[in-house]
Amino acid sequence: MNIKTILRWVLLVIVVGSVGVYGLQKSRKHDPEPIEASVSQNTALATVVVTYFTTDVRCDSCRTIERLSRQAIEEGFPKEVANGEVVFRVLNTDREENQHFLTDYELTNKTVIVSHQKSGKQTEWVNRQDVWLLFDEPAEFLDYLREPVKRFLGKT
């Protein structure tokens, strides 16, 4: 074997190894099963429904936004969550049954939607897109997400 052949093999091994490492890292970030909220709660009876819309591929920031969103609702409105007046849920828009939300709410990426319902029908909603700007500032995040919930609860 001459030096050119050896270098070709070394480069080939490096390229194949790099592709393998890249694929492994991507597969670790693939989390098809987000922590689902107790969807058994009947959202038709709720006054406020807070939905974190996610996809199959979830990064650390996505998980943080889900965790903080759940915390904002469950710790901010424990009585309302317990009696079903406020519901938090996680929906994956990569699943066929949830894809209509992409057009319903004009979603372009993962976000949190807070919707007000009256008699089981949605009357208004807000997209809390700035969760992406606030996820590393938990106190501000919690306040930001709780504000429309408080407002909607005051409308009942």
Image (cartoon, helix red, strand yellow):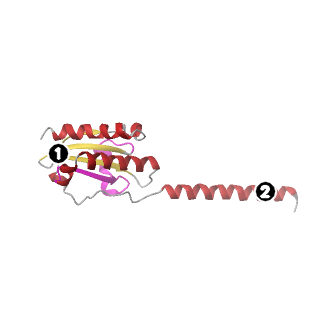
Which quarter shows the C terminus?
A: top left
Image x and y of residue 42, in percent: 18, 56
Image x and y of residue 12, in percent: 73, 57
Callout 1 crowding tier (Cα within 10 Å): few <14, some 14–19, many ≥20: many
Is residue 26 within the magenta segment? no
Is residue 107 within the magenta segment? yes
Identify the residue at the far bottom of this view: 1
Residue 117 tag number: 1
Q: Callout 2, which amino acid? A: Arg
Residue 8 tag number: 2
Q: Quadrant of residue 34?
A: bottom left
> Residue at coordinates 30% horizontally, 38% vertically from top-left?
143
Relative side of 79 to 141, left or right: left
Mark closer to the chain start, 1 or 2: 2
- Residues at badges 1 and 2 in contact (C-beta under 8 Å)? no
Q: Nearer the viewer, residue 86 or 96?
A: 86
| Range of magenta residues | 83-109
**Image position of 131 with respect to 13: above or below:** above
Image x and y of residue 128, in percent: 32, 39
> Residue at coordinates 36% horizontally, 37% vertically from top-left?
130
Q: Disc 1 versus disc 2: distance between alpha carbons?
A: 65 Å
As helix, strand or loop, the secondary structure at mark 1 comes to: strand
Callout 2 crowding tier (Cα within 10 Å): few <14, some 14–19, many ≥20: few
Q: Callout 1, which amino acid? A: Gln
As helix, strand or loop, the secondary structure at mark 2 comes to: helix
